[in-house]
Image (cartoon, rainbow, N blue to C red):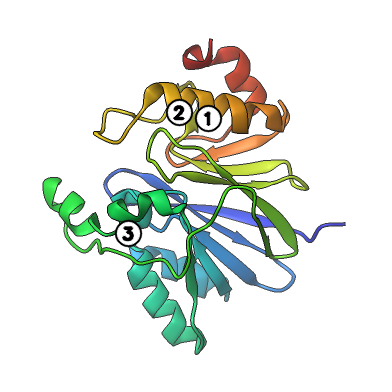
Amino acid sequence: MSASLSLEVVPVTAFGQNCSILWNPDTHHAVVVDPGGDVPRIMAFIERHDLSVDAIWLTHGHLDHAGGADALRKVLSHRQGAPVHVIGPEKGDAPLLASITAQAALFGLTGLENVQPDRFVEHGEVLDCLGHEFEVRHVPGHTPGHVIFYDPAARFALVGDTLFSGSVGRTDFPYGDHDQLIASIRRELLPLGDDVTILPGHGPATTIGAERTGNSFLA
């Protein structure tokens, strides 16, 4: 039987990005997914619940998902007295992670920093964390190195900016590819099963079934 798992969504940045904190309520160990910014807000929740963060996971390299990762890594490593590693996304997003400050400047934002992950992830690997096994799936199209983290036991996936309630990720970037994104969603997300709950990077949670039948982008 898998360990208990709790989830808190902490909205961050002017983009209202869903920074997700997953933790085991029995051990108080946690993982932070996509800390795009507002690190004091994220830390306030961590400290209030006395959590020990095992890792920071990134789904992709956009500023609103990764802009606070380096600062959070530093604060947590100092607080916990041991390195807290940034893991992911897939290596295709390395140029985006190295240009977060430049991305932020285009929006007139400050306080968001470039980040070098401690390691990138690969499609098909499994992250053993919090008493659960999370499958890494490469879902390019929104960005080249975008990944999702799927927990088969909990029937739950953190999908970043791939699939939303009634929509899909933007692809109007020089590196975006709408056809690739739709093909990736069909190949990697829809087969997970209609009962699987997904938490996108923005907006409310939904299910694979709801999007399979009601999302016009997948018609």
- The reply to whether residue 207 is visible in this rendering is no
Distance between the alpha carbons at the discs numbered 1 and 2? 5 Å
Q: In the visual, does 25 lie left or right of 120?
A: right
> Residue 16: where, in percent of width, then height?
35, 44
Distance between the alpha carbons at the discs numbered 3 and 2? 26 Å
Q: In the visual, does 7 lie left or right of 67?
A: right
| Residue type of the residue flagged with mark 2 | Leu
| Residue type of the residue flagged with mark 3 | Gly
The residue where tag 2 is placed is 181
> Residue 93: where, in percent of width, then height?
37, 50
The residue where tag 1 is placed is 184
Asked if marks 1 and 2 touch (Cβ < 8 Å), the reply is: yes
Give the camera-side residue of 8 and 31. Answer: 31
| Secondary structure state at the residue bearing disc 3 | loop
The numbered mark, 3 or 1, whose residue comes first in the sequence reads: 3
The residue where tag 3 is placed is 37
| Secondary structure state at the residue bearing disc 2 | helix
- The reply to whether residue 147 is visible in this rendering is yes
Which residue lies at the image location 62% right of the left edge and 21% below the top edge? Answer: 210
